[in-house]
Amino acid sequence: MNKLLNFLSVLCGTAALTITVVGLTACGTNTNYVDLMRVTGETEQRIMSDEATYRADGNLSDRVRAWSDIKRLREKQMIMAQRIRVESMPEVQAKTMTVEQGNAKKAELVAAATARYQQAEALPRPTQGITAM
């Protein structure tokens, strides 16, 4: 049983290293590197805690729960690494607006809508010009 636990911990460590290496080779900017390392570090701390719980629990249901938590955290780590990698792609960055660009676009749309509203207000109404009999 002890050999199985050692094998599982080595396997988990290898998977974490692989995810980190793949993520780092995919990341192009320092910001993404820092984000990936932060996510990896936080996830690794949780996984180590769950692995300690997994080893300490003698109850099978608790071990299964801890193992599923470890698996879920590994999947989350892979998804975050993929998301960071995609965000670093030039074609994605070209379509992404900064906050200032978003505010400018919003102001432009509001100005256009206001101009259309004022033009509509200036049009004569069907009831204008009708006199009471």
Image (tube, grey):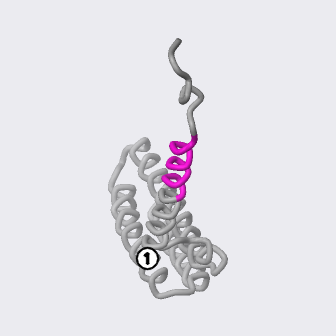
Image position of 47 (left or right of 25):
left
Write down the quadrant of residue 86 in the picture.
bottom right
In this rendered view, identify the residue nearer to me: 35 or 128.
128
In this rendered view, identify the residue nearer to me: 84 or 41.
84
Q: Residue placed at 57% from the left, 42% from the top?
A: 123
Name the residue type under label 1: Asp
Above or below for 75 versus 62: below
119 inside magenta stretch: yes
Residue 43 at x, y percent in the picture: 41, 66
118 inside magenta stretch: yes
Residue 119 at x, y percent in the picture: 55, 49
Query: In this orientation, does residue 46 appear?
Result: yes
Q: Residue placed at 60% from the left, 85% from the top?
A: 25
Residue 31 at x, y percent in the picture: 45, 83
- Judging by the rendered image, the residue that carries numbered circle 1 is 35
Q: Which residues are magenta?
A: 112-123
In this rendered view, identify the residue nearer to me: 110 or 40.
110
Above or below for 86 versus 30: above
Q: Helix or strand or loop: what does disc 1 sit on? A: helix
Q: Residue furthest front?
A: 133
Q: Residue placed at 46% from the left, 58% from the top?
A: 70
Q: Residue furthest right?
A: 91
Query: In this orientation, does residue 4 appear?
Result: no
The number of callouts visible is 1
Above or below for 69 versus 27: above
Main SS of the magenta segment? helix
Q: Residue furthest top?
A: 133
Q: Residue placed at 63% from the left, 81% from the top?
A: 90
Tell me if mark 1 has few (under 14), some (14-19) or many (20+) residues whose alpha carbon lies within 10 angstroms of its own.
some
